[in-house]
Image (cartoon, grey):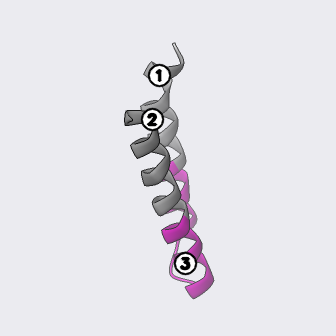
């Protein structure tokens, strides 16, 4: 159940970033911050 919620949240974030990118409002630092945060968040589940 938790894994499904994580996937749903990831999909919502990715869709929001895609929307911001299409609108030209996203800056590369936002996407980089998301990637770093998401990678760190997933690390404990992988180990």
Mark 1 or mark 2, whichever is nearer to me: 2
Crowding around mark 3 (Cα neighbors within 10 Å: few <14, some 14 to 19, many 20+) is few
Q: Residue 25 at x, y = what percent?
A: 51, 81
Asked if disc 3 and disc 1 are in contact, CB closer than 8 Å, the reply is no
Which secondary structure is most common in the magenta stretch? helix
How many numbered discs? 3
In the image shown, does 4 or 10 lie closer to the viewer? 4
Asked if disc 3 and disc 2 are in contact, CB closer than 8 Å, the reply is no
The numbered mark, 3 or 1, whose residue comes first in the sequence reads 3
In the image shown, does 15 or 17 lie closer to the viewer? 15
* Distance in Å between CA atoms under marks 1 and 2: 10 Å
Label 3 sits on residue: 19
* Distance in Å between CA atoms under marks 3 and 2: 24 Å
Q: Residue 3 carries which label?
A: 2
Label 1 sits on residue: 45
Magenta-highlighted residues: 15-34
Q: Does the magenta stretch include residue 20?
A: yes
Asked if disc 1 and disc 2 are in contact, CB closer than 8 Å, the reply is yes
Crowding around mark 2 (Cα neighbors within 10 Å: few <14, some 14 to 19, many 20+) is few
Q: Residue 33 at x, y = what percent?
A: 47, 51
Q: Which residue is drawn at 54% across and 68% down?
A: 15
Q: In which quarter of the image is residue 37?
A: top left
Q: Is residue 16 magenta?
A: yes
Mark 3 or mark 2, whichever is nearer to me: 2
Above or below, 25 relative to 34: below
The numbered mark, 1 or 2, whose residue comes first in the sequence reads 2
Crowding around mark 1 (Cα neighbors within 10 Å: few <14, some 14 to 19, many 20+) is few
Q: Residue 21 carries which label?
A: none
Left or right of 43 on screen, residue 5: left
Secondary element at image label 3: helix
Q: Which residue is drawn at 51% across and 12% down?
A: 47
Secondary element at image label 2: helix
């Amino acid at each position: 159940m938790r894994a499904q919620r994580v996937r749903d949240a990831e999909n919502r974030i990715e869709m929001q970033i895609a929307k911001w990118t299409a609108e030209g409002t996203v800056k590369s630092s936002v996407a980089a911050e998301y990637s770093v945060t998401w990678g760190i968040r997933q690390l404990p589940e992988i180990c």
